Amino acid sequence: MQSNAALRPGNASNVAVHDPLVRGMIWLLNKAAAALGLRDTLFYDVLYSVFYEIENNIVCDLEAVQTCSKWTVSMGHGLVVVFVYFFVFIVLLSAFKLETFSMFVVPFL
């Protein structure tokens, strides 16, 4: 077994499916994916990329924290922060029954 075998998706074509309904759905999904130009590993690739980004953005060593090194900010990080601030603000406005004022705040964020 290769050392990186766990990181690669398995080949789904070697799985024996006996139910005709499942076989039909698999055939239909494969044809739809082929028509759209999607690969078989699209779902795996998306999940792998998401978890890779999460791991890289959460992990920070002690030296980087103490010296403020490795400080990088991207547009994605900024959008998440602004979304969280906006969500908290909307929740506070709705707690005080002031949902109408949230539409006036949107242009200023």
Image: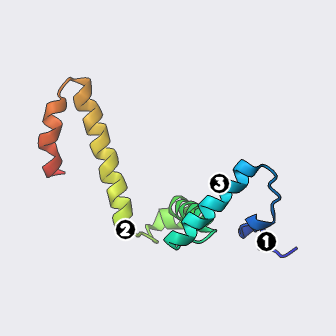
- The residue lying at 52 percent from left, 74 percent from top is 37
Place of residue 100 in the rendered image (x, y in percent of width and height, measured from the top left): 14, 32
- Does residue 44 appear to the left or right of 54 in the view shown? right
List x then y, in percent, for residue 30.
62, 65
Q: Nearer the viewer, mark 1 or mark 2?
A: 1
Q: Residue furthest left?
A: 104
Name the kind of residue labelled 1 in the image.
Ala
Q: Nearer the viewer, mark 2 or mark 3?
A: 3
Task: Name the amino acid type tagged 2.
Answer: Ser
Q: Which residue is mark 1?
A: 5
Identify the image quadrant of the N terminus. Answer: bottom right
Quarter of the rendering containing residue 99: top left
Q: Which residue is mark 3?
A: 25
Q: CA distance from mark 1 to mark 2?
A: 32 Å
Q: At 31% from the left edge and 38% from the top edge, which residue is drawn?
A: 88
Left or right relative to 41: residue 71: left
Instruction: Relative to 43, say whether 22 is above or below.
Output: above
